[in-house]
Image: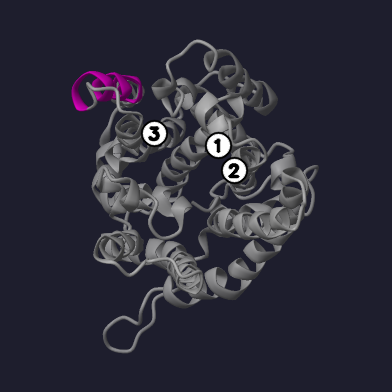
Amino acid sequence: MRQLPRSSSGPGPHPGRLPSLTGLRFAAAGGVVFTHCALLTDPRLATTLGPQVWVGASAVSLFFVLSGYVLMHSARPDDTARAFWRRRAAKILPNHVLTWCVVLIALACAGTAAANAPGVVAHLAALFLVNTWVPSRSFVSAGNPVSWSLAAEMFFYLLFPVLRPWVARLSRRGLLAGAAGALALVWAWPLLCETVLNPDGSFFTGYWCVYMLPLARLPEFVLGMMAARIRATGLRLPRLAVLPAALGVVSTLLVNSSFLPHVYMYAAATALPLVLLVHAVAELDLRGRPSLLRTPPLVLLGEISYALYLVHFLVLGVVYLCLTGLGWSRLGAVLVGLPLALAAAWLLYTGVERPCVRRFSAPRPAPGGRHRVPRRATAGRGSS
């Protein structure tokens, strides 16, 4: 297989690889980091819900769409559910377990009563990534707070071996209908939550139901799968450059946040623009076109994006508390914390994530002592 090009002006990568989507993952992680930095510098955003807040929400939605697209694009017909789950566990769990332990150690050192009965249950639920199924503040904020999205991802991974053959069997007309249906569900779910599941208008219940409940985020993952399959069937889709697609996402955030109810801003308003953005970026690799996102620095940043997502909130929080306590401004503390968060992410990626993926994602020896050829690391295929 041909190696990744050294510059965006060179020839495109192998058709099966989507390194530009790996670079796009850093943009998604950057969106989450941006929102948390904005909230640290201006806590009023948590109640005013300005556009800065919705950048992070749309970035999480982008992660879900990307996961569906990449996994469907790179799926092997002969792959087994067990092998798929093993690779996903090797990718997700080591970083998650380590950061979960760091949080609990920090709470213990701070003297926080993390060992009381409700706290133990909530933290254990966060460790096993089932905490966001419970509509409770103590559950959804347990462990590493940003790991709530991993609960949704693990739910997607559990269903993927069932969803993949179903999507693969759909005709072109069925795929278009399925994508339209998934998009309709993204829009219908907030209405269902507001009228049936949260008739009293509780902010937390609505927030949990629309944003954190894994079942609510499944249509976004399926949308990504449908988009990849539609492209694989050879169905001609409108060609959209990356810059107009990205501007479509930004304009949607700026315009819709001023008049749409906030429950539609968590995912519904940006679902279609994000799918178009993922499609446009993937086309750069599939058609061998130049791509800034395919350059080695951005691919590397995309590789560490998962680690950055897990550690940034912890690092920024610690630096913020320490420096503002010494009289620093909020913005100054955030600016100091950002490079530290990036350094911590690189250490976590190189010291934990990458070694664990290499060690545990490869197939085990077949019976009789024969060894199967190890599967290539998923990073170059647009890691999910």
Position in image of residue 121 (x %, y %):
25, 63
**C-beta proximity under 8 Å, tags 2 and 1:** yes
Q: Residue at x 43, y 31 (%)?
A: 227
Could you say which disc has been placed on residue 46 in the image?
Answer: none
Say which of 313 and 297 sits in front. 313
Residue 17 screen position, x and y as percent? 57, 50
Residue 186 shown in magenta: yes
User: How far apart are the alpha carbons under marks 3 and 1?
Assistant: 16 Å
Q: Which residue is mark 3?
A: 220
Residue 185 drawn above or below residue 165: above
- Image quadrant in which you'd find residue 127: bottom left
For label 2, the residue is 36
Q: Does residue 347 sit above or below 240 in this rendering?
A: below
Q: Amino acid at mark 2?
A: His
On screen, residue 73 versus residue 252, left or right, reads left
Q: Which residues are magenta?
A: 184-197
Looking at numbered disc 1 in the image, what kind of residue is underneath it?
Gly
Mark 3 closeness class: few <14, some 14–19, many ≥20 residues within 10 Å: many
Indicate which label's residue lies in the foreground, 3 or 1.
Answer: 1
Q: Earlier in the sequence, mark 3 or mark 1?
A: 1
What residue type is disc 3 on? Glu
Asked whether the residues under the numbered discs 2 and 3 touch, taking CB atoms below 8 Å apart as contact, a structural biologist would say: no
Q: Is residue 321 left or right of residue 110?
A: right
- Disc sitting over residue 56 in the figure: 1
Q: Nearer the viewer, residue 203 or 62?
A: 203
Residue at 29% in and 20% down: 188
Look at the image and say whether residue 320 sits in the magenta stretch: no
Q: Residue at x 45, y 53 (%)?
A: 145
